[in-house]
Image (tube, rainbow, N blue to C red):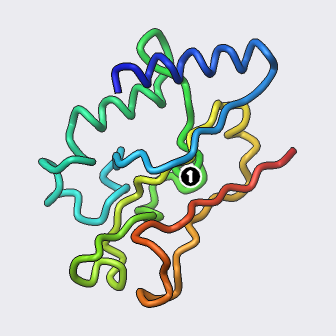
Amino acid sequence: MDAFLPYLRGLRERAAADGRDVLVCGDWNIAHEEADLRNWRGNRRNSGFLPEEREWLGRVYGDGETGAGYVDVVRAMHPGQEGPYSWWSYRGRAFDNDTGWRIDLLVATPHLAERCVKAYVERAASHTERWSDHAPVTAVFEP
C-alpha cells in the first residue's frame, strides 16, 4: 500500500500530461465506508475494514500532497446508499441475505468519473446462478 499510493499519484500525473484519463478496476479488498458492507459493526477489527486500510483508501480518493485524487465511480453514482455489494462470503446465507461487501472498485481520475452515466453490480439472480463469490462491477461512460 505504501508503494501503490505514490504509483497511483504518478500514473494520474503522467496521464494528465498526455491528456488522458485513468481507470483502475479490481478487487481492492477494502470496504471504505460503513455503507460498503452490511455488517460493518462486526467487522471493525477484520482485514478489509481496518481503520488503517480505510484511511489509506481515503488517501487514494483525497486531494493535496497526501492524496492521489481519484474518484470511486460507483460511490459517486450511488451516494449515501448501502452497497451495492460485489462480494459475499460462501458461509451461511450471505448471498441470499445480501450480507455483502463492496470491495471491487472502479477508481477513476475526476474527468473520467464525471463522464460516468451508470454504474452497477451484475449480481446473479440466485445463489445457485452465481459464478463466483464476487460479482462484476460495470460502469458506462459517455464519450
Q: Left of 21 or right of it: where is 44? A: left
Is residue 93 found left or right of 74 in the rendered image?
left
Q: Is residue 115 left or right of residue 39?
A: right
Q: Going by the picture, which residue comes out furthest to the right?
A: 143
The answer to whether residue 34 is above or below residue 63 is below
Label 1 sits on what residue type?
Answer: Val
Foreground pick, 7 / 64: 7
**CA neighbours of label 1 inside 10 A, class few (<14), some (14 to 19), many (20+):** many
Residue 86: name its quadrant: bottom left
Q: Indicate whether 62 appears above or below 119.
A: above
Q: Depth check: give the residue in front, 105 or 74.
A: 105
| Depth order, front residue of 69/126 | 126
Number of numbered discs on residues? 1
Q: In the rendering, at what x and y percent does residue 94 appear? A: 29, 77
Compared with residue 128, is residue 111 higher up or lower down, i.e. above or below?
Answer: above
The residue singled out by tag 1 in the image is 74
Q: Residue at x 30, y 31 (%)?
A: 55
Identify the residue at image location x=67%, y=55%.
139
List x then y, in percent, for residue 106. 57, 46
User: In this view, which residue lies farthest toward the top?
Assistant: 65
Give coordinates of residue 76: x percent, y percent: 57, 47
Which corner quadrant holds the C terminus? top right
Question: Which quadrant does the N terminus fall into?
Answer: top left
Instruction: Please give the name of the residue rendered at 35% of the width and 85% of the height, measured from the top-left corner.
Output: 96
Name the element at disc 1: helix
In which quadrant of the rendered view does residue 21 lie? top right
| Residue 11 horizontal/vertical position (percent) | 61, 20
Q: Is residue 41 above or below residue 21?
A: below
Residue at position x 50%, y 19% in the image: 7
